[in-house]
Amino acid sequence: MQRLVEKLDYPALYNTVISLNWQQYAQLPEPMEGGVINQDWLNNEQFLKAIYELCCRRHITEGAMQCPNCKREFLIKNGIANMLLNEDEV
């Protein structure tokens, strides 16, 4: 889990947990300025368990996700995000 945490966009993960109201599944500390991972977190068993719960055990089966840059929404159906371009975007 420690190597996974280093590759995560932690601020995006934290914001997703807040927006989905998943705090009851995983209590995460607020991101540090600049999105830097606090190295002490990598040795915190409770933090690593929370990351495991979110990344390996929680799944979105229906809904949508939105690109933070272009604001385009991608529908999620049966756990699969449809990220294909529309004909007018090709």
Image: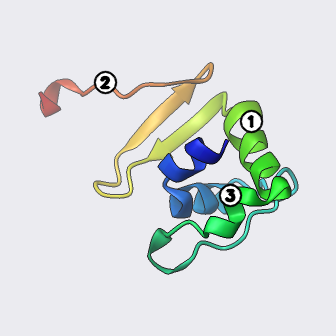
Residue type, label 2: Leu
Mark 1: secondary structure: loop
Disc ID at residue 42 = 3
Q: What residue sits 59% from the left and 62% below the top?
A: 15
**Within 10 Å of the Cα at label 2, are there few (<14), some (14-19), or many (20+) other Cα atoms?**
few
Disc ID at residue 46 = none
Mark 2: secondary structure: loop
Viewer-side label of 3, 2: 3
> Quadrant location of residue 77?
top right
Give the Cα separation between the discs numbered 1 and 3.
21 Å
Q: Is residue 14 above or below residue 3?
A: below
Q: Which residue is mark 2?
A: 84
Q: Earlier in the sequence, mark 1 or mark 3?
A: 3
Q: Is residue 47 above or below residue 84?
A: below
Q: Position of residue 49 (x, y in %)?
A: 81, 47
Residue type, label 1: Arg
Task: Work out whether residue 24 or residue 6 is closer to the camera in this orientation and state it.
Answer: 6
Q: Which residue is mark 1?
A: 58
**Coloration of the structure image:** rainbow
Viewer-side label of 1, 2: 1
Q: What residue sits 74% from the left and 41% below the top?
A: 52
Q: Earlier in the sequence, mark 1 or mark 2?
A: 1
> Quadrant location of residue 76?
top right
Viewer-side label of 1, 3: 3
Q: Position of residue 21 (x, y in %)?
A: 76, 57
Total numbered circles: 3
Name the image quarter holding the N terminus.
top right
Give the Cα separation between the discs numbered 3 and 2.
36 Å
Q: In the shown orientation, is residue 10 left or right of residue 23?
A: left
Q: Position of residue 2 (x, y in %)?
A: 64, 47
Name the image quarter holding the C terminus.
top left
